[in-house]
Amino acid sequence: MRASDRAYATLRAQIMDWTLPPGTVLGEVDQASRLGVSRTPLREALSRLTADGLVATQAGHGLVVTDISTENIRELFEVRRALEESAAQLAAERGSAETFEALEREFLAVAGVLEDGDPRRSAYYDLVRRFDDALDDAVGNPYLVAAMTSLRTHLSRIRRHFIDDEDRLRDAAREHLTIVQAILARDSQLAAHATHVHLHHAMRSALKAS
């Protein structure tokens, strides 16, 4: 792996899991030394993170990790509703029954996963990631998938930091199950509506926690 790719992957992971929280100054000298790379590949990594919207220039500080505000959350969910409701509709029309039947079984069993101690959240988030992947595959529209992928970068930061309520996680699992079952029923309108309900509750939870 190239030094710039390694620096990018490390910094991105640390921003996503809040090891580097919003407002962290990413000085070139300090970060290059910490990551064991020269300043040229570090600049490449920081440029990619800026394009991702995870890093931005702040007057007097240089490059810093971007903030997540209440307004940011509302804006992200406005875009998320438009994209994911359309994606759910398309998945109901085009999705693989076998893929979504497997997801249905996992979401039915997820309540047990959520009660298994500390690993429960990582297991649940992995299931949600696989649901997202299945949705992307079902949509079959690279432009829509690219837009959703970019958006998920920011949504993942919100999810990992704010949504720490086990009751909310269980509710979210049931909401995902409803979406999956609507897709299996080939009911595009129900799939879109179930997605709308899920995103409404997800946004309220994120805003409450912020």
Image (cartoon, grey):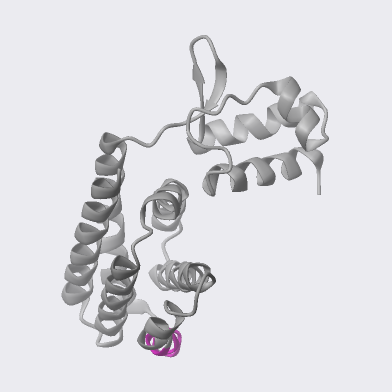
Give how far across and how far down residue 202 sits, in percent: 27, 58
Q: Quadrant of residue 136?
A: bottom left
Please tell me which residue lies in front, 185 or 180: 180
Please state, as top left, top right, bottom left or bottom right, where the C terminus lies in the image: top left
Picture coordinates of residue 111, whole percent (x, y): 37, 82
How many tags in the picture?
0
| Residue 102 to residue 142: above or below | below
Looking at the image, which is closer to me, 142 or 193? 193
Q: Is residue 96 visible?
A: no
- Where residue 74 appears, as percent x and y from the top left, is 24, 42
Left or right placement of residue 148 versus residue 5 in this view: left
Q: Is 101 within the magenta?
A: yes
Q: Could you tell me which residue is drawn at 17 percent across and 76 percent down?
A: 190
The correct choice, above or below, for 67 with respect to 85 in the image is above
The residue most toward the front is: 117
Answer with the quarter of the image where residue 176 lies: bottom left
Residue under the image location 41 percent in, 62 percent down: 141
Query: Residue at position x 23%, y 48% from top?
Result: 208
Q: Which residue range is magenta in the image?
A: 98-105
Asked whether, in this view, residue 52 is left or right of residue 185, the answer is right
Q: Position of residue 32 (x, y in %)?
A: 77, 29
Give the residue at the far top of this rendering: 60
**Any magenta on residue 202?**
no
Q: Quadrant of residue 200?
A: bottom left
User: Chief secondary structure of the magenta span?
Assistant: helix
Residue 148 in the image: above or below residue 177: above
In the rendered structure, the answer to whether residue 176 lies left or right of residue 10 reads left
